[in-house]
């Protein structure tokens, strides 16, 4: 009986640790901006647009929220690079992860679309209102 109670408490704790509510989204968006900015030579030049929350509902997921949007920042020459898609998520057990999507057209000999572009499509296709 004690083992069953311990297992139930463990499962509930796991669910709580990996559950986000709409109250968590503003802090998640702030963390996403900080994480994405860290990729640029001039992080304070980053301009974000079209930021939204999406939930990954694939593979039986509980719906980890992803911050998706576009960012434009200055390169080493001081010129803006153009809008680039990005996605960001954080697992309360694994920490934050983000990627800026390379949407440049593939070379003629490369047939497939970039993996980061495919992941953006997968992670950011379930926009939610909050």
Image: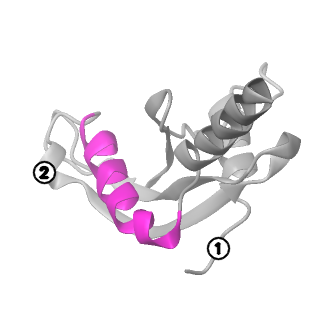
Q: Position of residue 102 (x, y in %)?
A: 54, 37
User: Which residue matches tag 1?
Assistant: 128
Judged from the image, the secondary structure of the residue bearing numbered disc 2 is helix
User: Which residue is at a point 74% across and 50% down the rendered structure image?
Assistant: 62
Instruction: Please tell me whether residue 67 is drawn above or below residue 60 in the rendered image.
Output: below
User: Which residue is at a point 49% across and 26% down the rendered structure image?
Assistant: 94
Q: Which residues are magenta?
A: 21-38
Which numbered disc, 2 or 1, marks the residue closer to the eye? 1
User: Which residue is at a point 46% across and 67% down the rendered structure image?
Assistant: 51
Crowd class of label 1 (few under 14; some 14 to 19; many from 20; radius 10 Å): few
Q: Residue furthest bottom?
A: 129
User: Which residue is at a point 37% across and 60% down the rendered structure image?
Assistant: 29
Quadrant containing the C terminus in the rendered view:
bottom right
Cα distance in 3D space between marks 2 and 1: 28 Å
Instruction: Please tell me whether residue 130 is drawn above or below residue 55 in the rendered image.
Output: below
Which comes before the other along the chain, label 2 or label 1?
A: 2
What is the number of callouts on the image? 2
């Amino acid at each position: 009986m004690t083992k069953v109670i311990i297992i139930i408490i463990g499962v509930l704790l796991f669910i709580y640790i990996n559950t986000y509510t709409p109250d968590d989204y503003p802090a998640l968006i702030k963390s996403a901006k900080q994480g994405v900015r860290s990729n640029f030579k001039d992080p304070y030049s980053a301009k974000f647009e079209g930021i939204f929350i999406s939930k990954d509902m694939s593979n039986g997921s509980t719906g980890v929220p992803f911050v998706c949007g576009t960012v434009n920042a200055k390169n080493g020459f001081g010129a803006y690079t153009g809008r680039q898609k990005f996605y960001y998520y954080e697992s309360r057990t694994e920490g934050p992860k983000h990627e800026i999507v390379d949407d440049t057209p593939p070379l003629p000999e490369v047939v497939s679309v970039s993996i980061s572009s495919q992941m953006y499509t997968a992670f950011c296709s379930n926009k939610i209102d909050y």
